[in-house]
Every structure is written in structure tokens, then in C-alpha cells.
Amino acid sequence: MQKQRLIDYWRKTGTITDEKLLKAFNEVPRELFIKDGFEEEAYGDYPLPIGEGQTISQPTTVMLMTQALELKENQKVLEVGAGSGWQAAIIAKIIGKKGKVITTEIIPELAEFAKKNIEKAKIKNVDVINYDGSQGYKKEAPYDRIIITAACPRIPPPIIKQLKIGGIIVAPVGSLVFGQDMLKLRKTKTGITTQSLGSFVFVPLKGKYGY
């Protein structure tokens, strides 16, 4: 019921207009990606703790970021910060079985948690890698799309390098004190175009290019 309410709200307000994304949200059970004891809050529109000082982002934030990626079938996507694996699962649904999500998680316990959750959701086209994703993941580069799910002081240069021409990066950039600006970057033959999607607050990116 709460799940449908969110979908209806996004449609009514025009917050989310991508029908493939709404379908993916409907098909991926968020309750599989949260800690025991929070099941009844699975579809509250707010973040929830997932352990190790990290959170699963609120549904609206995840949907806005995913929509900004302009995903297409068969793409290869890098996610920096798997968390509980929920956003990777939604992306995986949209890009289809021939598409691939590489999601990195620097905290070993969370990487394990995300792996188990994705298995429970029976999603096959996601690889969870315990790695410092602030450096990107060169082994699988280049990527059609890259999403960073933690606050970064700037977009890490290796990540820009690993993006294909015509590719999109979505990431919250800014200070930990005043919040971050959600940026959408598009890589062109002549450089990078940047668009702001508004203000957000995320946990800090860890690793070489994090805080």
C-alpha cells in the first residue's frame, strides 16, 4: 500500500516520469535491502540505517538520481557505494539481462550485505566488489553511466576518465557541513557539461578521493 502511494505521488507531482524506472521500483522489494526490524518502514520516504554508520537513501532521492542517469538497455553502469545493494538492483532491472552493474563498496561488511540482498532479490546482472570505488574500477571500464552514492569533495578524476564519450555521471558534490549539490555531468568530445539537480545531504565518500 505504502509502495503504491509513493508511485502515485511521484506520478502526480511529476517528480518521476520514467515509466521503466517506476516499474523497476515496483518490482524490486526494498524490504529485502534493509536491516531486520525495519521492515514496516521499508516504504517510508526517508533514509534508514544499514549498519557501519551508513544508510539506505530515501526512495525519492534514489529515484531522482537513477532517473538522471537516463538508463538504456544493455548498458554497463558503475555504482560507487553499494550500501545495501538496492539502487544497484533497480538499475539492473532497467538495463536488462544483457546490461551489467558493477557496484563497489569499501566497507567489507556492507559489500557482503549487498551481495546477499541482491541474491535474495534473484538479480543476476550485478557484481558487488569490495573496493575503493572513489578510484573508479578500471578493470571493467569504460562505463556508459556512473553513479556516486556518497558526498564527494569533487568528482574523482579517474571516474571521469573511465566514462565513455556521451556518458553520464550523477554525484552529490560539496561540503559535509553545508550539504551537497547533486550534479549531472555529461562527457562530450569537447569536455564536460554540468547540470545541478538541487541540494541533498549524503554520508561522506570514503577512500583515496573521498573525505
Image (spheres, rainbow, N blue to C red):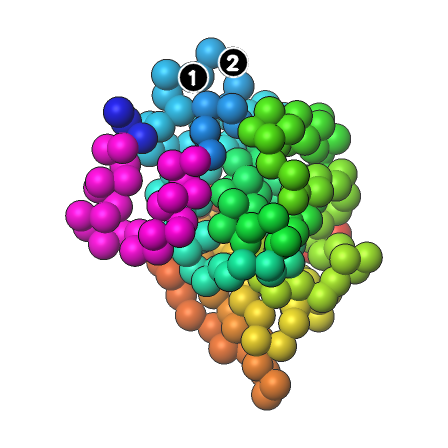
Q: Quadrant of residue 46?
A: top left
Q: Which residue is mark 2?
A: 36
Q: Secondary structure at mark 1?
A: helix
The reply, left or right, for residue 47 in relation to residue 208 is left
x and y, in percent, of residue 187 in the image: 57, 76
| Residue 31 on image: x %, y % | 46, 23
Dominant secondary-structure state across the stretch colored magenta = helix
Vertically, is 73 above or below 121? below
Question: Which x, y percent locates residue 86?
Answer: 53, 36
Q: Residue at (65%, 44%) from the top-left corner?
A: 125
Disc sitting over residue 39 in the figure: 1
- At x 35%, y 55%, the residue is 18
- Horizontal side of 191 relative to 201 (left or right) equals right
Instruction: Find numbered disc 2 in the image and state the secondary structure of the residue it sits on.
Output: loop
Q: CA distance from mark 2 to mark 1?
A: 7 Å
What residue appears at the point 50 percent right and 77 percent down from the top-left corner? 193
Kindly indicate whether the residue at mark 1 contacts the one at mark 2 (C-beta within 8 angstroms).
yes
Image: magenta residue range: 4-27
Near-viewer residue (45 or 22): 22
Q: Is residue 9 magenta?
A: yes
Placement of 131 over or under 208, stated as above or below: above
Decide whether residue 116 is among the magenta residues: no
